[in-house]
Image: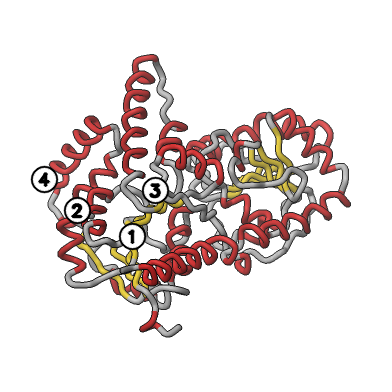
Amino acid sequence: MTEMDKPKILFISHVFPFPRSSGQRQRVYYMLRAAAAYFHVTLLTYSPSGKEKKLEYELDGICEEVIWLKNRFDEHKKISKAYYKLRASLYSFLTGLKTSNYYIGKLEFTEKRIIVALGDRTFDIVIYEYFHAWESVSYFKKRNIPVILDTHNILWQSVSSQSKGNNVLQNLLKGYKLNKYKKVEEAIWAMFDEVIAINVSEQKYIQSKVPATVKVPLVCMGIDVSAWPYSWQSARPVRLAYYGGLGSPNNVKSALVCACEIMPEIWKKFPGVELWLIGSSPAEAIKKLESDKIHVTGFIEDVAPVIGSVSIMLCPWEGTFGFRSRIVEVMALGVPVVASRNAVDGMDMEDGKGIFLTDNTEQMIEQSTRLLQDKPLLEIQSKIARDKAISQYSFEATYLKGFERIYDSIEHRKVVKP
């Protein structure tokens, strides 16, 4: 198939695919890369003025065309920014959505700006990364162009995990806003022809909330396994670890559970074991843990060798939203994982197949202790973890397979079109 023969796909994304320092940026990068195998790819986005050339260079080979919108918020003077901030706060209060929804959907990606930017270009399909610019969907649907939403995750569930306040009144207000956010997000899903879910649990939930005419395919958060080569080689002293951006509230909470609840019990039997907290931008609460037994790495350019030296990766995550792609990276390197069931909810992980699933910290302690006492078992599980990551969560098994399906649906649509 030549470039001229490829159908045309448009991505609308406020998240840029570089640098790939976060899960959402990686998601956009892999979506674009997979689409390029089957489609002529156009990306509609915006960025701070003056950075277009650098960003276009990074996108070379993935996108055939990048259409830049000027960042309206950044280009205006301070008085205008104050005005927009006030409008965003009011919008958030009235709708329950975040201020970012206002900036992205009401300021940057308005239907009028999109129409002007696209000009006379035509597309076979459009993908929105996140739902923020949903008000422009009608423009494409009027032209009988299929429109797909890539959710990234059910956002209201993410908001819910961060919505607890310090008193009853705060919790009531946050609960009120959360309920409004949930209703808006779930109503928006029905506007799309397809809503892509990232795990099985979210797929089932979205299916229960949208009309039967809306397809809900599954495209998990895969990884390029060649970037995470098998390299497990347990260091001495033995290391247990937690891995994730250590500035986010959920990761801080999980890291503290590892350091303050799990490790003290591990040290009773294995006093020489170290805990490594691996991740960028560690919060002050994490930095304070640094000691001769607890190592806080901060940002590491090439994190794979450090993770590969860990005997067991811990993940006492709470909350069942989203997708823990960090666990897949760890398993690809061959590091066995002990995790809460919540951490891998909907990810179709099998207990005892490179990962051990637990219901509480007591079980995490017991399972970690058992593995530390059985090196041959650790070695077996290391190989299984790698195999599982390749077969189920490689780029080919997730993103590429997903866009093969989308391409086939477009070709089928051309055949049956009167």
Lower sequence index among marks 4 and 3:
4
Question: Looking at the image, is 119 positioned above or below residue 347?
Answer: below
The Cα atoms of the two marked residues, 3 and 1, are separated by 12 Å
* Left or right: 235 as drawn, with respect to 133: right
Which mark's residue is nearer the viewer, 1 or 4?
Answer: 1
Q: Residue 410, image x and y in percent?
A: 40, 67
Under circle 4, the secondary element is helix
Under circle 3, the secondary element is loop
Identify the residue at horizontal 39%, vertical 14% (top origin). Answer: 168
What residue did someone put label 4 on? 79
The Cα atoms of the two marked residues, 1 and 4, are separated by 40 Å
Question: Looking at the image, is 291 positioned above or below residue 53?
Answer: above
Lower sequence index among marks 1 and 4:
4
Which mark's residue is nearer the viewer, 2 or 3?
Answer: 3
Q: Nearer the viewer, residue 264 or 167?
A: 167
Which mark's residue is nearer the viewer, 4 or 3?
Answer: 3
Q: Residues within 10 Å of mark 4 (few under 14, many from 20)?
A: few
The Cα atoms of the two marked residues, 4 and 2, are separated by 22 Å
- The kind of residue on which mark 1 rests is Pro
Lower sequence index among marks 2 and 3:
2
Q: Is residue 250 something that shows in the picture?
A: yes
The Cα atoms of the two marked residues, 4 and 3, are separated by 46 Å
Q: Quadrant of the C terminus?
A: bottom left
Lower sequence index among marks 1 and 2:
2
Identify the residue at horizontal 30%, vertical 71% (top origin). Answer: 66
- The kind of residue on which mark 3 rests is Thr
What residue did someone put label 3 on? 213
* Left or right: 269 as drawn, with respect to 97: right
Numbered tag placed on residue 110 in the rendering: 2
What residue did someone put label 1 on? 146
Q: Residue furthest front?
A: 418
